[in-house]
Image (spheres, rainbow, N blue to C red):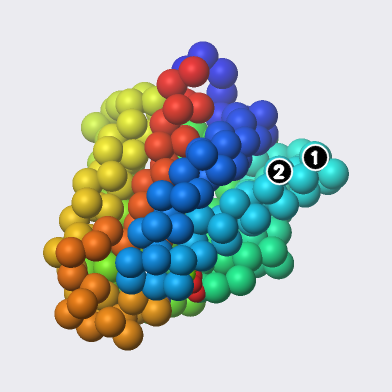
Amino acid sequence: MNAAMDTAFFSAWVGEIARAVQSDKERLTRLDAAIGDADHGINLDRGFTAVVQALADKDPGTPGALLTLVGSTLIRKVGGASGPLYGMAFREAGKALGDASEVSAGELATALEAGLAGIQKLGSAVEGDKTMVDALAPAVRALAQAVRNGKDAPEAIGEAASAALAGTEATIPMTARKGRASYLGPRSVGHEDPGAASTALILTALRTVAAR
Ligand code: ADP
Ligand code: MG
């Protein structure tokens, strides 16, 4: 990555999320069909389509303002559990960035930590409950660790994306304890959690943009 993590970088991230959600819409919905109500891909596609439109309309001037707008748009446009949860995460991440015009890898790690804290405050899921937290928590840890080890942003973000993918895979044998999937009890075992899968997709999109 040659460019700094500025507003254009975060805008490119959101564009890449929207593209990835659209192309993986069916896969996410299929995962949700197995242990939920088959709307996760549809929910996120609707949400990120609205987000791209909102960014074009309002043209936020800082990374923090941009992430805050992503969050408030998701809250407005996405029903279900994931809209408020992702909305809260992006809003808290945006708030953590303040009005800085460029973001370091360490500041990004702090912002994602704030996003995770927001999700856990709202949904009270812990790791092992078979939710998006099982992808995001290890990703946030990997990012912070990589930054402490002196890795540059693309490398550190790459490690976060890998951790999110591994965390998603690790949800397969788990029993769901939060959200709709928890109604299934032990029958939720053997399926990947759709929210963990979409979190991995969001962080993979970040890796793609950081590697450009
Ligand atoms: P809904 O379950 O309302 O249909 P979605 O299908 O869009 O909403 O999202 C389902 C995902 O939301 C789940 O796969 C899980 O990862 C996540 N989720 C549900 N409840 C919680 C919670 N309390 N904390 C964290 N994540 C949750
Ligand atoms: Mg659902």
Looking at the image, residue 16 lies above or below residue 78: above
Mark 1 within 8 Å of ligand 1, using the beta carbon: no
Q: Secondary structure at mark 2?
A: helix
Identified by mark 2, the residue type is Val
Q: Residue furthest left?
A: 173
Identified by mark 1, the residue type is Ala
Image coordinates for residue 184, horizontal then vertical, percent = 28, 82
Residue at point 36% right, 59% down? 31
Query: In this view of the protein, can residue 199 be seen by the observer?
Result: no
Q: In the rendering, which numbered label is found on residue 52?
A: 2
Q: Give the image quadrant in which the ligand numbered 1 is located.
A: bottom left
Image coordinates for residue 131, horizontal then vertical, percent = 33, 66
Q: In the rendering, which numbered label is found on residue 56?
A: 1
Viewer-nearest residue: 197 or 64: 197
Viewer-nearest residue: 123 or 98: 123
Residue at point 52% right, 45% down? 21
The part of the image, by quadrant, that contains residue 88 is bottom right
